[in-house]
Image: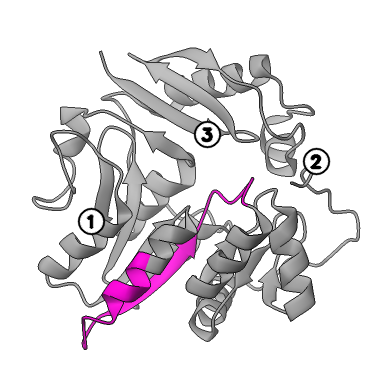
Amino acid sequence: MDKHVIEALGRAKITVQDGKVVDVGEPMIEYCPLFHKHRGIEKLTPEEIENNLQFRIADFGMCTKDRVLRLKDFLSFGISEILSTLLADDIIDCAIMVCEGCGTVLITESELAQGVGGRVSGLVETSPIPELIEEFSPNHIVDGETAIIDQVEGFKLATENGYKNIAVTIAFPDDGIILRELEKEYDDVNLYLFAVHTTGLSREESELIFDVSDVVTACANKHLRDIAEEEDIFSVGSSIPIFGASEKGEEFIKLRLDKIGGPKKKTGNSKHPYPLI
């Protein structure tokens, strides 16, 4: 029996086993503008969350052997879209991401980055799905036997494979601190950190995430918004901003904006996640 644990839709803890949602916890927030806009969900409840996850399972095979891994660029804006653009334009040669059924993976294809990261976020635990593992290049999964999620080991594996310009998604500041220390051991490797799944981080953790990262997504994190305003950090988007925490991060965000024809005009009617925490 395979088991996959995801924190999604307000950071509710959701367990999927054998293609079925078997447990849904209470979400930390009750409203997300993205799910309201795209799925019509006005309030995040366990029932709505279960329905959305079952829809994803039926639609693109989430957490099953039938998972559709590749996705074309639909000109939207987010972390996976930025990574997809960086791969397409050969600015990075590898992205360390997380995929259900595989754990930490090394991705070198633009459409694979979009399909893996754009459809499922907040994966905290997974177990091997052989059919999905076979879709990745040899030696591009940290541990196919356990499907472990370990971004630090992912970076090490990428350097062993000879990649030089490496992006890594992180959800914890401790991983970022370790990775920045590791980066110092290489003279010819460029490391770029993309902070995801930031809802619920404390003020101190949020400050650390900004310190170590290049690009940070706000999710429903109040502290990140406050720090960005206090320190005048470059950002794009109003409902769920994405921050350029470094010069390179700002450059990456602007590159993606150019790809989609520039930022959307602000209407002043943007809704925010509620509550911000």
* Dot 1 alpha-carbon crowd within 10 angstroms: few under 14, some 14 to 19, many 20 or more: some
Answer whether labels 2 and 3 touch (C-beta < 8 Å): no
Disc 2 marks a residue whose amino acid type is Tyr
Left or right of 59? Residue 273 is right
- Label 1, label 3: how many angstroms apart (C-alpha)? 22 Å
What amino acid does circle 3 point to? Glu
Relative to residue 223, is residue 54 drawn left or right?
left
User: Which region of the structure is painted magenta?
Assistant: 178-201
164 drawn magenta: no
Which of the marked residues, 1 or 3, is nearer the chain's N terminus?
Answer: 3
> Which one is in front, 174 or 58?
174
Is 97 displayed left or right of 239 in the figure?
left
Q: Amino acid at mark 1?
A: Glu
Indicate the position of residue 47 as horizontal and vertical percent values: 66, 14
Which numbered circle lies on residue 153? 1
Q: Residue furthest right?
A: 268
Q: Residue at x 28, y 82 (%)?
A: 184
Which residue is under mark 2? 274
Q: Visible in this render: residue 7?
A: yes
What residue would you read off at disc 3?
A: 7
Kindly report the distance in space between the C-alpha atoms of the residues bearing marks 2 and 1: 35 Å
Q: Secondary structure at mark 2?
A: loop
Q: The N terminus is located in which quarter? A: top left
What is the crowding at mark 2: few (fewer than 14 residues within 10 Å), some, or many (at least 20)?
some
Give SS at disc 3: strand
Q: Left or right: 174 with respect to 43?
A: left
Residue most extreme to the bottom: 187
Q: Nearer the viewer, mark 2 or mark 1?
A: 1
Disc 1 element: helix
Q: State which tag comes first along the sequence, 2 or 1.
A: 1
